[in-house]
Image (cartoon, rainbow, N blue to C red):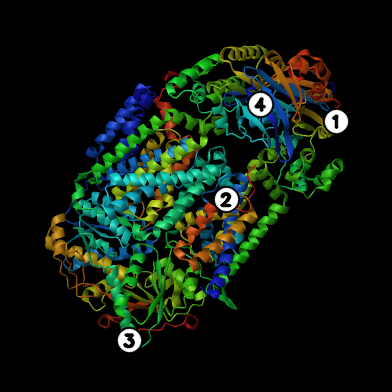
Amino acid sequence: MDVETLANALVAGILTGMVYGLSALGLSVIFGVIRIVNFAHGELLVIGMFAALVLFRWLGLDPLLSVPLVAALLFVFGYLLQSLVIRRVAHLADHMQFLLLAAIAIAMVSGCLIVFGPDPQGVQLDYALDSFAVGLLVIDKTRLYAAIAAVLVAGLLLAFFKYATVGRAIRACADNYLGAQVVGLNVGRLYALTFGIGSACIGAAGCIILLLVDVHPYLAPGYTLLAFIVVIIGGMGSLFGALLGGVLIGVAEAMAAVVIQPSLKTAFSFALLIVVLLLRPQGLLGKAPH
Amino acid sequence: MELATSRPRRRAVLAGGVAALVAGAAPFNIGRAQGSKLKVGVLLPKSGLQAQIGIDCQRAADLAPALLKSKGFGDMELVLGDTETNPQIARAQAEKLIDQGIHVLTGCFDSGQTLAAAQVCEQKGIPFVVNIAAVPSLTEQGFKTVFRNFPTGPMIATDAFLLQKEMYAATGKAPKTVVLMHVNDTFGTSQADAITKLIDKFDMPYKIVERISYDPAARDLSAEVRKGKGTNAEAVWFISRLNDAILMTREMIKQRWEPMGIISSGPGWYEGQYMQALGKHGDDVVSLVPWYDPNKPMSKALVAAMQKAHAGLTVNTNHAHTFEAMLIIADAYKRAGATDAAKLIAALEKTDIKDNVTVGPGVKFDEKHQNPKTRCSAVQNRGGKNLAIFPAEAAETKPVWPMTPWSKRA
Amino acid sequence: MSLYTRLLGDLTGRGLAALAGFVVLLVALPSLVSSYIATVATIVLYLAFLGQAWNLMLGIAGLLSIGHALFVGIGAYASAYLFAIHGVPPLLGVLAGVAIAVAAGALIGYLGFRFAIGGVYFALLTIAFAEFTRIMVDHAKFLGGTEGLFLPVSAASRHGFDLLNLRGSPEMFYYLILALALAALALCRWLLTGRTGYYWRAIRDNPAAAQALGVDVFRYRMYAAMISAGMAAVGGVFYAFFYNNLFPEQVFGIERSIELTLAPIVGGVGTLFGPIFGAFVLTPLGELFTAGVEWLQTSGAIGRHVKVDGVKPLFWGIAVAAIVLLRPRGIWPWICDRLGLVKPPSERS
Amino acid sequence: MSAAPILEVRDLDLFYGDAAALEDVALDVGAGEIVAIIGANGAGKSSLIRTIHGIEKPRRGRILFKGQDIAGWPSHRVADLGIGQVAEGRQIFAGLTVEENLDVGGFLPRGRATRARNRDRVYALFPRLAERRGQHAGTMSGGEQQMLAIGRCLMGEPELIMFDEPSLGLAPAIVQEVFGIIEQLNRDGITVILVEQNVAVSLKLAGRAYVLENGRIVLSGTGQELLDHEGVRQAYLGM
Amino acid sequence: MAPLLQVEGVAKSFRGLRAVSDVSFAVEAKEIFGIIGPNGAGKTTLFNMIAGAFRPDRGQVQFDGRDITGFRPDKVCDAGIGRTFQIVQPFAELTVLENVTVGALHAHREVAAARLAAADCLDLLELGHRRHMHASNLTLPDRKRLEVARALATGPKLILLDEVMAGLRPTETDRMVVILQRLRAEAGLTIVLIEHVMRAVMALSDRVMVLHHGEKIAEGKPEAVVRDPAVLTSYLGGAAV
């Protein structure tokens, strides 16, 4: 394998990994705070992609420009989902939550199938097939834009949790549920906000991913698994962990594909997941459970 | 529906309720009056990964009853099933269609799904005329009720080599190295196996430098293309499905991979949706696939009917072979004069159709129920149309080889 | 305690009658209904069987597995490989399949317990193993890879009956899976009323307290994981010989794993009859939706070319979500209470 | 009781499943008082505080805060009326910095406008917190965490603070400091309910006290009366 | 004869906080040994080290002539030590009888025999009439009794009782005292108990040890210990306030 191929694969892996990381951020935020494992993650992402697709078809809006709109839409969806449905199963065991979310996921995929059909659909942008050549590297424009957008959105989210009082209050809920009740935080509303913010993040990721991938309903389960792998490797609930996990998986898959065999690349993600679960179940940047 | 009105008594929920639920699930077609029409089950992947292709095949099946009736064949009624691109569902759907009283089955485009359905037909004694499926074992297992008018993997590979030689000779430009990239599913793997196994027999001008397999469900094929480009092969040979063919092309352009040409043996690269999605970038691909002979009268009838039903749609492998399967069924029904399974199978074994659609001398099954004479064509995408370039007797135009570089397309 | 008390002692007269009626109905079913419905019933029983196996893992040992298709697949591929390639009858093949699956269950259980990976993390560990195996089998030429592994069928299997080689008519498979499902029920019941069962339930409720009472928690959890895996592998052998074809994606896919968790969760996790009941509710429910959608189409309410592929799973998803929200302990405990099928603890011997 | 009651609890029942945790509890707290609640482990002291604070929902009974019945209200509304709690085990946000902890403590509507001023007051009261404002709360010592828990509670401008086992797990010198702070807060006009295993200390500190056994109030009186009570001495003072 | 239980210099810290430091004591066979001290004195931590829930940082635990330091809880139970939990830990979904049967299966191979033995234990603890209730529905005092019955059913030589009297009414406390005395007299059981209810401690214990801030500050006859000035200071908070 020559240097040129490896270098190109590495760069593409990092760029793709940033987008992976952004999509996993939404999962990580929701799990970190509400302790709900969102098995409908990929479905929300696909809904975000379809929303961006519709905006592109109707208004000719570049998916990158529709990020705020789609994020707002998914925020509302996530807020309602948490406050109307998921709140009711919060006291139930893991497997019941899993089943509920899996059922919701199936309903969402089917809804997409009815509305949009099974065919992969994408956006054709003016710059869709452009690329930059820098020395040995050939970097495609959409991937670079997607990565930049992912980093911007992730930065925005991190700043929100770090500096906004609501963001701090949400972190407080995640940190100590009883403590949050004791200081009089409205935990129910903050949870709904969190699910909304997590979903908005997934929606933003959906818009960005639409640059790289054509959307069809059956994409969803694959993205759910991918996000899980990313988040577990990075550390459930750790936001930087999700980004790191995304880049690691992006690079690992790209390298496995060029060095070994593309059809084996996901096996590496799963092997990495198993190793991390065994050696460091809290993930690379996660905190050990109390 | 029974279930809605007869609510099971509470006491008997455990026993009676379950029975009622199960009974309530009975399909409505059971016990429908048997007419003199031949009921043909058409089982195709109409949702899931191969949905577009299944739907494409369906278009030809839909045209068949009326078109064939006008040619003097008997009445046929289609009973439709969807495999959801899943062999297990293909099996269940085949059983369900048989329960609904079909006399003969056709389908299923995909090798895995076709094999699963074939097992059911074999078990139940229902004749099954395969429209498209290349996996050799389908006619090597000794099924008594399964017939195939589609070339097997090795036949396709053989023709692919012969057609390439013809093309390289005609254009005077042959690659010295080729990278083989195939989708890692039933069709892709068996086809790639056949190619690597047979290449030495044909004294080709090139070596296959690497065989790259990729996941049919892959979302992003950039690393795959990067690996292919990294081999520095002069030409690339794909075995793909539709969606990955589109993704592959886009990535090749973005990564500025300019091979001498793209060869495909299999679906994807010749399809209407491919050319539609890629426009000028979809041109010049050469597909070495089973094809129709545009010069045959039945082909002309099919093309005309297709134009009438779906203006702008060009006839392709999916249409030709699905239609021809219907033709074979209609022909057997005419000769058998009955809908009885045993008589239909006997008639199918004696099939000898000259007035057909696909390339080759006609339809005649060997003792394994395979049509050994069916042949492939080389077709090239040109301005959004598929034009046959080889073999010479079924050609419509001259080849463009090497292909126009991406950057030089107007 | 007599075998009778251990297996049936908790049932009221009404419960016994219901069980007897249910069994009689199942035995008579193939002669009452069309072959299509008999096939549906076979699948229902198959899911009921697997549901019980899975239930041991979660309901009893407290481990949420969403990768149980791994064990099913191991049983299926091991026995099918031995039969199709080497001609080894499945009666022997099942031993190989079970042995490998039990070893896999032991490995995953060991890793899960020893590294204290619980709850959702354990679930993901099981998914990871199942998916990893799927991709490996995709590339295992000797198992057919993505081209699939096929078991020979012939017209002779239309009416035949060859238990040794598991070649035969649909009826044979129906009665085989019926026997397996009932045997699984009896086995679970027998285990639960014995020492192991007491320990399992204690560990599920409170592992620390169980350990203080001298229960070797690790060992008994391992038993549950291994028995569950072994039973799932038996189901896999049935799967292989009933369907006759195996594809990695179809066998090991996460959809398969999720599918087999549905019946026990809907029926009631930790209950014995719940998984069976859940299977008898869910599969017909799915078929009903299919029939309903077809009816809508044939009656012209919706056009033939409307995209209806999603309608069935859409309703199905909504129905399952409704069950979770309304009956979070599962449907079976609720039915059981309403109908008085099981004795209260004070009347048990 | 010297002053008008700020908190009156009447006929309060709390159940966990079918098991009663509180039965028929009644108590009064006057504005400006320190009231101690003593009892064995599991007697229901924490349950009582959690029920007053809205974290547990009572099955029956009234909880009147300044005349308003707040039984069954969610905790964020209770807190916004001016009832604060320094919970058992401190329950600080370990992963947040000291400053962020205080910030979240001032998230209540009643403390939002004056957040900056309240923060300065807390820092003045606990100079050690000011020194460590950027430090993660989980890395501080037990005593510092207890200071933070109290400071965080003050950010909500409470009129009544309920302390649940404030001395638990603290070194003796720190315990004295904590009790000193409680006294000082009381002098500044904050009413205090004190649940404390360290019975002798809490009885000495409290104006009045209640004894809780098995979820029922079995005894009440001034701190000194209970210190001298034979049953209390036997049951809780080891003599 | 060597003492049945001998604890030598055990110590345990959590996150730098010393919960128990260098505590040693010995309990003779058939003795009733009380451990008292204010909350947070380290009593339960000490129990957890004996019962195998925590491994001591330092020190040794000898039981019945064997070193059982660092044994897993089930192995400690095998060795002959039963325990109760201060915060009761019933098997909530099991009935009271089934709860105790889990313990009894340690001493009896057969389920039927174990159920009979469990029923006996329940009668002894005066819980017989509640045997078919689910453990989650018991009142707190009954749950405490269930803890004792369950530990007893394992057939131990020595039992560690962690505040089993807490929450009992005075008459109930007296009943429990009688029951424990009978167990010692009839079954030859050795008892180590942590207790706040002094009435019970005084009535039951042959000897008492006092812990304060993780350290042993006194040990001896109960009457002597409660007059020890160091003990009085620890309870009354000394100069506090």
Q: Quadrant of residue D29?
A: top right
Q: Secondary structure at mark 4?
A: strand
Give how far across and how far down residue A209 sits, in percent: 54, 63
* Residue E6: numbered disc: 4
The answer to whether residue D70 shows anywhere in this view is no
Tell me if residue C261 comes above or below residue E6 in the rendering.
below
Give how far across and how far down residue D178 sits, in percent: 82, 34
Q: Residue at x 44, y 20 (%)?
A: E113
> Distance from label 1 to label 2 (Cα)?
50 Å
User: Mark 3 or 1, which is nearer the eye?
Assistant: 3
Q: Amino acid at mark 3?
A: Ala
User: Mark 3 or 2, which is nearer the eye?
Assistant: 2
How dense is the environment of label 3, judged by Cα within 10 Å: few (below 14), some, or many (20 and up)?
few
Q: Amino acid at mark 1?
A: Glu
* Residue C223: numbered disc: none
Q: Nearer the viewer, residue C68 or B372?
A: C68
Q: Secondary structure at mark 3?
A: helix
User: Mark 4 or 3, which is nearer the eye?
Assistant: 4
Chain for disc number 2: A
> Distance from label 4 to label 3 (Cα)?
97 Å
Give how far across and how far down residue A97 sits, in percent: 52, 42
Name the residue beneath numbered marker 1.
Answer: D183
Chain for disc number 4: E
Name the residue beneath numbered marker 3.
Answer: B169
Tell me if residue D235 comes above or below residue C112 in the rendering.
above
Tag 3 and tag 2 share a subunit: no
Chain for disc number 1: D
Tell me if residue E78 comes above or below residue B384 in the rendering.
above
Give how far across and how far down residue C51 sits, in percent: 40, 40
> Distance from label 4 to label 1 (Cα)?
45 Å
